[in-house]
Image (spheres, grey):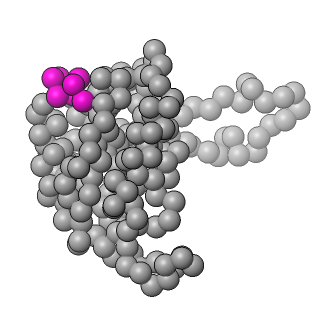
Amino acid sequence: MRIVGLYSFNGGVEFVQQHFSNELDELKKAIENVDAEVHKTKVSREKTMPGKVLYSPVDLNKAFKTELLPLGWKNIKEKCDYSGAYYVDGYENPQHKKVFPFRDMDFVKNQLGIEVQFGKYSFMVYNVCAKMTIFKKLGHITAGVEVVPVKELAEQMSTGVSYFEQFVWDLEQRGVSDIDIPVMIIGIAP
């Protein structure tokens, strides 16, 4: 795969280049090493493209794990301890004690967090505007990188997959908040 787009959210490109050059080099090499064509394995069952062979998000995510985990990148999981204190009087959620939820970040190394996202746009926005902020507050990261497909790649995946161009537009319309961390957005293509 190749990097074809870069967007600096809250100074993310400059911050990551300045403070995480080694980690960024590892990520760039990992992206180059992922052979997109090997992961064109998903046969569509969607009405709009029945039988068409598409890129598999699951397989692409596994390829990134294969590249980054041996280099010391780790998946970080944070247990969510949900409180029952906010239910109205008289309600006790029967699932409350059975659920063991968590949030995780795909890859973390030396305080840099990476999310590889081939899902819907809401997940991309959530990663940058909520999850990365939370993981900074918890002391796991100081900056982030979000790796997403550009439109060219997204069009060869299942319907509903968001893409770099749409994501950048959303972030530019939202603006930056005082709690946002520096995030480099990387758009990739086959």
The residue positioned 23% from the left and 49% from the top of the image is 4
Q: Position of residue 161 (x, y in %)?
A: 46, 58
Q: Please determine whether, in this image, residue 161 is positioned above or below residue 156.
A: above
- Magenta region: which residues? 13-19
Q: Please determine whether, in this image, residue 58 is positioned above or below residue 186.
A: below
Q: Position of residue 85 (x, y in %)?
A: 73, 25
Asked if residue 167 can be seen in this view, the reply is yes
Instruction: Give the main secondary structure of the magenta stretch.
Output: helix
The residue positioned 87% from the left and 27% from the top of the image is 89
Asked if residue 74 can be seen in this view, the reply is no
Tell me: 87 left or right of 163.
Answer: right
Quadrant in the picture for the C terminus: bottom left
Query: Which one is nearer the viewer's eye here, 61 or 119?
Result: 119
Residue 100 in which image quadrant: top right
Tell me: 99 left or right of 187.
Answer: right
Quadrant in the picture for the N terminus: bottom left
Q: Position of residue 128 (x, y in %)?
A: 42, 34
The residue positioned 10% from the left and 33% from the top of the image is 22
Residue 71 in which image quadrant: top left
